[in-house]
Amino acid sequence: MRSTAQIEQMVLAHQGHLLRYLRWLGCDDNLAADMAQETFVKVIAGDFHSDSPQALGAYLRTTARNFYLMHLRRERRNVALPEEDVLEAAWAENEGDDFGESYRRALHECMQGLAERAKMALTLRYGENASREEISQATGLDPEGAKTLLRRAKDKLKECIEKKVGKDRNELAANGRD
């Protein structure tokens, strides 16, 4: 039986990772929160124990995916998900052993390199869920200009993140840790 402190530690260590995975599968924020909660309850009540964060993460993802598939069946929605090994390979490629920390670090660094107006537009859109009209007012652009600014900023971020994450992985491989 896990102690309250162990349960708290497990949830803190894996909750963000699990929520990102569920949203990646197609859950909206509320459904992802519900599925994550069900997953943790099942794991806490069950007998799965591992000292490996990677093994626990894989078990949580499998359990959450199964809850999501059951939800889709109950809703009579037919969503074709790739096979489990394909999903796991794609997830591992993007999250890696650091639970996506390298991507978040790269995003933070790359955001610093953007122009202030581009940072403001991205923050408004993805941090505050602002409409294109609200972004255009805040940036002093017309709505089409705001749309173009967002697209260019996202493209620049994507390119920067891919370079930084690729560089980090190449450095790890060179040091024999990949």
Image: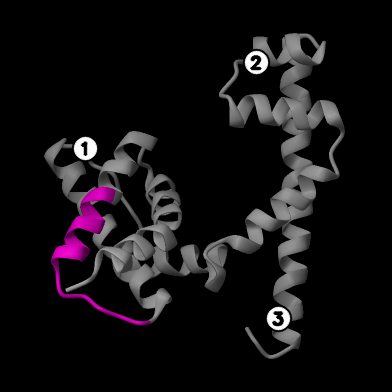
Magenta span contains residue 39: yes
Dot 1: element: loop
Mark pair 1, 3: CA separation: 42 Å
In terms of depth relative to the viewer, which is nearer, 163 or 49? 49
Mark pair 3, 2: CA separation: 40 Å
Q: Amino acid at mark 2?
A: Arg
Quarter containing the N terminus:
bottom left
Query: In the rendering, at what x and y percent does residue 35 appear?
Result: 26, 47
Query: Which of the 4 image quadrants contains residue 116?
Result: top right
| Region of the chain picked out in magenta, as a range | 37-51
Q: Amino acid at mark 1?
A: Arg
N-term-proximal mark, 1 vs 3: 1
Instruction: Indicate whether 50 appears above or below 160.
Output: below
Q: Main secondary structure of the magenta part?
A: helix
Q: Amino acid at mark 3?
A: Leu
Q: Nearer the viewer, mark 1 or mark 3?
A: 3
In terms of depth relative to the viewer, which is nearer, 4 or 131? 4
Q: Which residue is mark 2?
A: 132
Q: Which residue is mark 1?
A: 77
Residue at the image position 49 percent from the left and 68 percent from the top: 92
